[in-house]
Amino acid sequence: MARITKTAAARARELGYRSGLEVRNAKRLDAGGFDYDYEPFKLSYVQPAKPRTYTPDFVLPNGIIIDTKGRWVTEDRQKFKMIVEQHPDLDIRMVFSNPNQRIGKNSPTTYAIYATRLGIPFAKEFIPQAWIDEPINQASLDAIARMT
């Protein structure tokens, strides 16, 4: 299967398509004199619920849950977004090897920015002593107890 080069993809976008494959098929339809509409509407659908589980890397006695990440890929970021939304009582924090790493090659958003948007405190490389010394977060401990 041939790979679309950036040049081919750019040419496709210039023609109003998303890929070279779409361009090739549109040209074939045009050459055959066939009528067609390209992306005439959006079709709504609901992705079925998929029960998932998450295993924290570390849980401190004070109720702070810590996950460590070298790479924080899209799937992981989406997972943490859902976890934070669905478990607001948990005190979840992140330790990144590099919080200034961008979430994508062309994105200005870093791991730090994304974590901040989710309301997740973060640190670089190591669990800060201040987190270890924090007082007990009873709401987080109670939520953890309900899960175990």
Image (cartoon, rainbow, N blue to C red):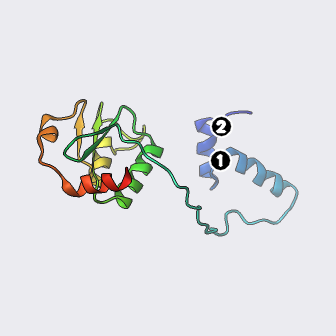
**Sequence order check: which comes first, mark 2 or mark 1?**
2
Amino acid type at image mark 2: Ile
Residue 83 in the image, given as x and y percentages of width and height: 39, 54
What residue do we see at 72% from left, 33% from top?
Answer: 2
How far across and how far down the image is residue 17, in percent?
Answer: 64, 53
Quarter of the image holding residue 73? top left
The picture places residue 37, in percent across and down from the top left corner, at 73, 66
Left-right relation of 92 to 51: left
Q: Could you tell me residue 132's position as x and y percent?
A: 16, 38
Residue occupied by mark 1: 19
Is there a contact, CB below 8 Å, between mark 2 and mark 1? yes
Above or below, 142 against 102 in this view is: below
- What's the residue at 21%, 34% (across, down)? 127
Q: Quadrant of the N terminus?
A: top right
- What is the spatial separation of the Cα atoms under label 2 and label 1, in whole angstroms? 8 Å
> Which residue: 58% across, 44% down?
10
Is the residue 26 above or below the residue 61 in the image?
below
User: Is 67 above or below relative to 30?
Assistant: above
Q: Residues within 10 Å of mark 2 (few under 14, many from 20)?
A: few
In the picture of the structure, the residue carrying the numbered disc 2 is: 4
